[in-house]
Image: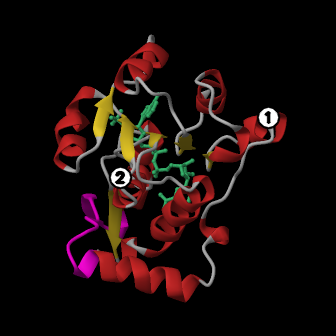
Amino acid sequence: MAGSLYVAGVTEWGASHAVGPEKGETVVISGAAGGVGSRAVQLARHTGATVIGLASGHNHAWLRSHDVIPVSYGEGVADRISDAAPRGVDAFVDTFGAGYVELALALGVATERIDTIADFAAAEKHGVKTDGGAAAVPGAKVLAGLARLVADGHLELLIANVYPLTEVREVYAELERRHTHGKIVLMP
Ligand SMILES: NC(=O)c1ccc[n+]([C@@H]2O[C@H](COP(=O)([O-])OP(=O)(O)OC[C@H]3O[C@@H](n4cnc5c(N)ncnc54)[C@H](OP(=O)(O)O)[C@@H]3O)[C@@H](O)[C@H]2O)c1
C-alpha cells in the first residue's frame, strides 16, 4: 500500500494545490474514484471546500462516505453539476480528460483555477494549468505530509486490487478500460 502513495500522491497534491480550493468554495473533480481522483477528492475535502466528484453510480456510495457529493458523468453532466452547486463552481481538477477542461470553462470556472493532468492539448488551447507530481516540491516534504494524513486516518489509500507481477499484461488491460476504483498494486 505504501508503494502506491508516491506517484499518485504527489500528482493529486500538485493538481489540488494548483487550483487552491478553500472553505466555502466548490470544487469539481473528474475521475473521482480513480487512482489519482480518489485521493484528490479527499485532499480537496480536507481544505473545507465542498467537493463534487464525477463517477458512475457504483462509486457513489464510496464518495458519499468521504463527504464528497457524487455526480454521474455522461450526457447532462453540466446540468447535474449546476444542480449540485447552486452557488456555482470555483475550481475544477480534471484527472480524466475527454472534454472536462471545456466543461469547466462552460461552468464559468476561471482558467487559473482549472487543472488537468490528462488533457494537455486542451490545456494548451485554453491556457489552463497542468500541474501534477512535478509541482509537488519539495517532494520529500509533500510525501511526509501525505504519509501523516494516512497515519492519522485522514487519507484513505484506496486499493482496487493486488496482483502478482506475472499478471502485468492483464493489469494494463484493466487500466486501459479506465474504470479502476483506486490504485492497482503489483507485487514483485
Ligand atoms: N495513477 C497515477 O499514479 C497517475 C500519476 C500521474 C498521472 N496520472 C494520469 O492521471 C490520469 C488518471 O489516472 P488514474 O489512474 O487515476 O485513473 P483513470 O484510469 O484515468 O480513471 C479511472 C476513473 O475514471 C472514471 N471514469 C471513467 N470514464 C469516465 C468519464 N467518461 N468521465 C469521468 N470519469 C470517468 C472511472 O470511474 P467509474 O468507474 O465510476 O466509471 C474511474 O474511477 C491519467 O491520465 C493518468 O495517465 C496517473
What residue is disc 1 on? Answer: 126
Q: Is mark 2 within 8 Å of ligand 1?
A: yes
Q: Quadrant of residue 131?
A: bottom right
The quarter of the picture where the C terminus appears is bottom left
How far, Cα to Cα, is label 1 from label 2?
26 Å
Query: Quick check: 106 left or right of 49?
Result: right
Query: Quick check: 47 left or right of 161?
Result: right
Give the residues drawn in magenta, as a range: 150-166
Image position, residue 54 (x, y; %): 39, 33
Is residue 165 on the magenta stretch?
Answer: yes
The one nearer the camera, 99 or 129, is 129
Image position, residue 50 (x, y; %): 36, 43
**Which circle's residue, 1 or 2, is located before the other in the chain?**
2
Mark 2: which amino acid? Ser
Q: Would residue 30 be visible to someone looking at this image?
A: no
Mark 1: which amino acid? His
What residue is disc 2 on? Answer: 38
Q: Quadrant of residue 4?
A: bottom left
Q: Residue at x 20, y 41 (%)?
A: 64
The quarter of the picture where the N terminus appears is bottom left
Q: Residue at x 52, y 87 (%)?
A: 141
Q: Residue at x 35, y 81 (%)?
A: 147
Q: Secondary structure under badge 1?
A: helix
Is residue 180 on the magenta stretch?
Answer: no
